Image: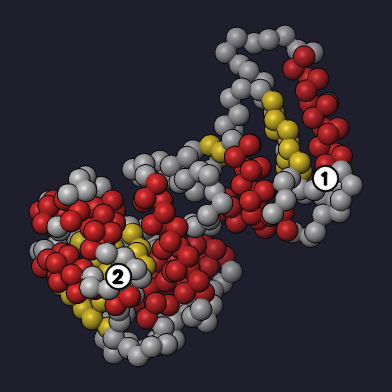
């Protein structure tokens, strides 16, 4: 039970006492173990601020990028103590909570993506970094609507219809290149897309500017990144196993990428802000060979790059 009311800590205590008494009064059933959890938004003597707890809860469960979260999109059920501790981090104060009994993974994770490969610590860090960069950028384009005028095909439309090749879109500082990248990144995410549609933010959107849901596999903010970092990011996105030695040279990655038979889209933004001496290496030694693959599509948005392969 989740309680978001004034003085909810008092109610939680009473609920815990009553619920705990129920299993004790019933005969045990083989193969079944009673369990319960109660989380209250405020202590017994405090008033609740309107919607603060519920908004924090909704954000943690639905947002694609949340630093405080201790579970991933591969976690099917969230434990009550995980949720309570994560809410504590986001709210800055510990919610009242009590749980008892085994088998408490009964809170479904709405962002569960069971088909995804497990994320290691580095991959998770990289995904969170990308979220910090691209999500705010996407929000800065007039409520999901890009004001950028492209002389040629919009990158989202290009992704849908171009089989392979390289396209470059340039613009001066402040022309919202990262905003376009952020828009593609966030609107390709199923949860973000649903939120935007629910709010009516896409009602007037030109269809050619909307990316297919799920098309982006990886978004990297290249600021401070090295060739080693970039090779590792692409390898993780394509589920290609590389040793640390292999990550020093893109040759092994390129060879493995030639055998890919599923759609892949990789975004690189702010390439010119990669670690000193690495922007050229990343572009010439990694991105250019990827763009040369027969199934690869690599639009360059200003200082950003997106590689996409067609399913063979």
Give how far apart the Cα atoms at labels 1 and 2 are: 48 Å
Question: Pointer 2: what residue?
Answer: 275
Q: Residues within 10 Å of mark 2 (few under 14, many from 20)?
A: some
- Is residue 5 depicted above or below 168 in this figure? above
Q: Is residue 197 left or right of residue 11?
A: left
Q: Is residue 149 left or right of residue 228?
A: right
Q: Residue at x 52, y 67 (%)?
A: 197
- Is residue 290 depicted above or below 15 in this figure? below
Image location (x, y in percent) of residue 68: 56, 51
- Is residue 294 depicted above or below 92 in this figure? below
Secondary structure beneath dot 2 equals loop
Image location (x, y in percent) of residue 99: 70, 30
Secondary structure beneath dot 1 equals loop
Question: Pointer 1: what residue?
Answer: 43
Q: Residue at x 86, y 32 (%)?
A: 14
Image location (x, y in percent) of residue 246: 16, 50
């Amino acid at each position: 039970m989740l309680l978001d009311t004034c003085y909810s800590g008092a109610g939680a205590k009473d609920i815990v006492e009553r619920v705990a008494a129920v299993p004790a009064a019933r005969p045990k059933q083989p193969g079944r173990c009673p369990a319960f959890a109660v989380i209250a938004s405020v202590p017994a003597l405090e008033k609740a601020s309107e919607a603060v707890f519920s908004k924090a809860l909704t954000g943690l469960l639905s947002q694609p990028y949340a630093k405080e979260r201790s579970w991933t999109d591969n976690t099917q059920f969230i434990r009550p103590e995980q949720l309570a501790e994560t809410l504590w981090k986001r709210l800055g104060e510990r919610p009242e909570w009590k749980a008892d009994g085994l088998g408490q993974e009964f809170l479904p994770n709405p962002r569960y993506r069971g088909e995804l490969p497990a994320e290691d610590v580095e991959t998770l860090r990289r995904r969170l970094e990308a979220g910090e960069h691209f999500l705010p950028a996407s929000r800065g384009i007039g409520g999901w609507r890009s004001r950028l005028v492209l002389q040629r095909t919009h990158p989202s439309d290009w992704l849908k219809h171009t089989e392979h090749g390289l396209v470059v879109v340039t613009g001066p500082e402040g022309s919202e290149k990262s905003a376009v990248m952020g828009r593609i990144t966030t609107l390709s995410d199923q949860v973000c897309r649903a939120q935007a549609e629910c709010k009516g933010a896409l009602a007037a959107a030109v269809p050619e500017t909307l990316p297919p849901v799920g098309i982006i596999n990886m978004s990297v903010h290249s600021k401070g990144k090295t060739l080693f970092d970039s090779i590792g990011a692409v390898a993780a996105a394509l589920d290609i196993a590389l040793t640390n030695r292999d990550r020093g040279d893109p040759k092994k990655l390129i060879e493995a990428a030639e055998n890919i038979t599923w759609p892949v889209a990789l975004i690189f933004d702010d390439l010119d802000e990669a670690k000193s001496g690495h922007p050229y290496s990343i572009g010439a030694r990694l991105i250019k060979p990827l763009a040369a693959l027969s199934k690869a599509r690599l639009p360059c948005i200003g200082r950003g790059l997106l590689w996409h392969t067609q399913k063979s």
